[in-house]
Amino acid sequence: MKYFIMTILLLTSLPCIATIYMQKNADGSVTYSDVPLKDAEPVSLSSGNSVPSTNMSKPPAKTAGAKPAEEYYKSFKIISPKDGETIQNQPAINVKVATDPEFRAGDTIQVFLDGQPWSDPVAGTSLDMTNVDRGTHTLYVKLLGSNRQTLKQTETITIYVHHVNTNFKPNR
């Protein structure tokens, strides 16, 4: 059985090594064939397209000078809103942070209002907080790495949110 399979494979591969012939016709057209025609010349073919394989190397090992993720950022702070700021009649409060060096892809921020997470972590350096109740609030932001470990945390700031009370009607 194994000799039969080997014979079939050998016979099917024979056309791959056949000679190719080229014949130029009287009208200038060219005909290629594996059968020698009248006035046909054998064509020598190159070995074909080949691409050398590349060696897959291991990623470079961490050098002694490389900083761990927790030490990558030198500074991380809230730039908006400011500590002690009063926010009046705004439908959304835009929280912006600054990092040094620049914010890395894969890292996220998470805003905490009064000690509770405001939303899921987001990629980027700003987040809009909508429908914040009026009153005094504390706010801080955590910088999270790609596996959600805390890399840095801002200082806690205090903000004052004021909304117009439409239910209040002064005496007239």
Image (cartoon, rainbow, N blue to C red):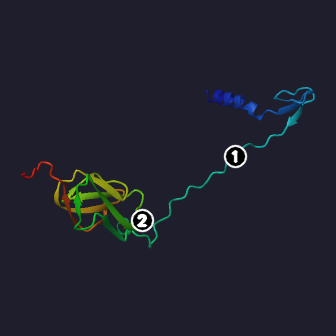
For the point 74% across and 33% down, the residue is: 16
Amino acid at circle 1: Ser
Q: From the image, state whether disc 1 or disc 2 is nearer to you.
A: 2
Q: Which residue is at the front of the view, 102 or 90?
A: 90
Regarding mark 1 in the picture, which secondary structure is present there? loop
In this rendering, the answer to whether 85 lies above or below 92 is below
Question: Residue 22, which numbered label?
Answer: none
Q: Please state, as top left, top right, bottom left or bottom right, where the N terminus lies in the image.
A: top right
For the point 89% across and 34% down, the residue is: 41
Residue at the spot of label 2 = 102
In this rendering, the answer to whether 49 lies above or below 153 is above
Query: Number of labelled discs?
Result: 2
Residue at the spot of label 1 = 50
Residue lying farthest to the bottom in this orientation: 65
Image side of residue 70 versus residue 131, left or right: right
Amino acid at circle 2: Glu
Q: Position of residue 124 (x, y in %)?
A: 37, 57
